[in-house]
Image (cartoon, helix red, strand yellow):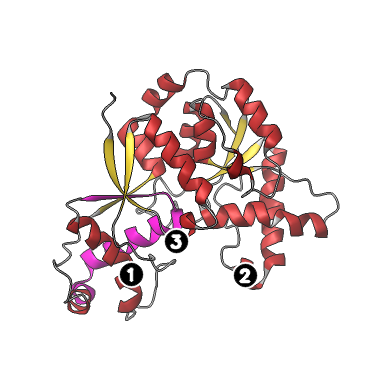
């Protein structure tokens, strides 16, 4: 029986709702690679976005409590899939460690906790885990031919790379997403819109503006000859996929393009069946590209 490496896992809110296929596909792929996700007990919302207000202690308590829970469970690493959760957890921890005044306020606000947070929890994202813990050469050898003949447009968005020094890769010249795509046997499109903002939470109040961002990003991926756009952020996935409906309504020449979580692609590369319920979460049809991937893998 293959030994499994357990990872303390922070799901965040969206992966329990509109991005369940992200979580499920990640669990399937990581199990095949020897990892078992152990969901953090008593986790709470990370706060969604990192607060830039200097005196906003309450907003920083949300992510820091999750890092504290990791220490309570005897861990020093916390794994997450959501790019926004990753960004918020990393930035809150940096602030805690570098701002003595904030550190003191946080400790006082969490006076009822069983232990005091020490600032030593490391946050891991899927991309950094696959690069640093698995290794892309190892992954490539395991996958073999994989998705040879498939071209994917890697979409980083904002939160994976910014701010500089806290992202999963170099902010100006990232390559981790492209390297993962190549390790899966696919071709990584030279995609100029890979780090452009998808429109983020403007999607709630100004969906037409976000749909215009979607049109530009999807259009760029199409010009690059991509079969699909690969993402790792639930909000980016929603905007780039669901807002294609508005883009198509506003622009008669707009063509739908599949948007897939990188974990869904990884499952197919590993020979894991794409589960039928996952398709219901997608707006742009994915059947054709899935069939193409299954034939290649």
- Give the mark nearest the N terminus, 1 or 3: 3
Task: Check the image and report above or below for 219 versus 181.
Answer: below
Of labels 2 and 3, the one closer to you: 3
Q: Find the residue positioned furthest to the bottom.
A: 55
Q: Residue at x 54, y 50 (%)?
A: 195
- Judged left or right of residue 151, residue 73 is left
Q: Which residue is mark 2?
A: 204
Viewer-proximal residue among 217 and 37: 37
Looking at the rendered structure, the secondary structure element under dot 3 is loop
Label 2 vs label 1: CA separation? 23 Å
Alpha carbon separation for disc pair 2 and 3? 17 Å
Percent from the top left, x then y, of residue 204?
Answer: 62, 70
Residue 165: mark in rendering: none
Q: Residues within 10 Å of mark 3 (few under 14, many from 20)?
A: some
Which residue position holds label 1? 62
Q: Quadrant of residue 265?
A: top right
Q: Residue at x 40, y 26 (%)?
A: 139
Q: Residue furthest left?
A: 115
First to last magenta residue range? 76-103
Q: Residue at x 47, y 27 (%)?
A: 183
Asked whether residue 199 is in view, the answer is yes
């Amino acid at each position: 029986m293959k030994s499994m490496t357990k990872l303390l896992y922070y799901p965040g809110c969206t992966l329990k709702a509109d991005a369940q296929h992200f979580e499920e596909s990640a669990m399937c792929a990581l199990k095949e690679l020897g990892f078992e996700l152990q969901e953090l007990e008593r986790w709470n919302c990370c706060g969604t976005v990192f607060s830039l207000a200097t005196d906003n202690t309450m907003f920083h308590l949300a992510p820091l409590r999750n890092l504290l829970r990791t220490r309570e469970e005897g861990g020093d690493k916390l794994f997450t899939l959501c790019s926004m959760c990753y960004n918020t957890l990393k930035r809150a921890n940096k602030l805690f460690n570098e701002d003595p005044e904030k550190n003191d306020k946080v400790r006082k606000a969490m006076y009822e906790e069983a232990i005091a947070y020490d600032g030593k929890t490391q946050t891991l994202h899927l991309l950094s885990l696959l690069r640093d813990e698995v290794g892309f050469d190892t992954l490539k050898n395991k996958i073999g031919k994989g998705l040879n003949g498939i071209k994917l447009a890697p979409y980083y968005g904002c939160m994976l790379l910014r701010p500089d020094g806290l992202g999963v890769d170099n902010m100006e010249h990232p390559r981790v997403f492209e390297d993962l795509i190549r390790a899966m046997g696919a071709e990584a499109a030279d995609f100029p819109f890979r780090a452009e903002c998808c429109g983020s939470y403007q999607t709630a109040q100004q969906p037409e503006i976000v749909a215009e961002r979607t049109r530009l990003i999807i259009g760029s991926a199409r010009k690059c000859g991509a079969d699909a756009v690969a993402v790792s952020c639930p909000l980016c996935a929603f905007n780039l996929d669901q807002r294609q409906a508005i883009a198509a309504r506003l622009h008669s020449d707009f063509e739908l393009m599949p948007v897939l979580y990188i974990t869904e692609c990884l499952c197919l590369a590993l020979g894991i069946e794409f589960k039928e319920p996952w398709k219901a979460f997608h707006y742009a049809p994915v059947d054709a590209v899935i069939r193409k991937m299954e034939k290649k893998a």
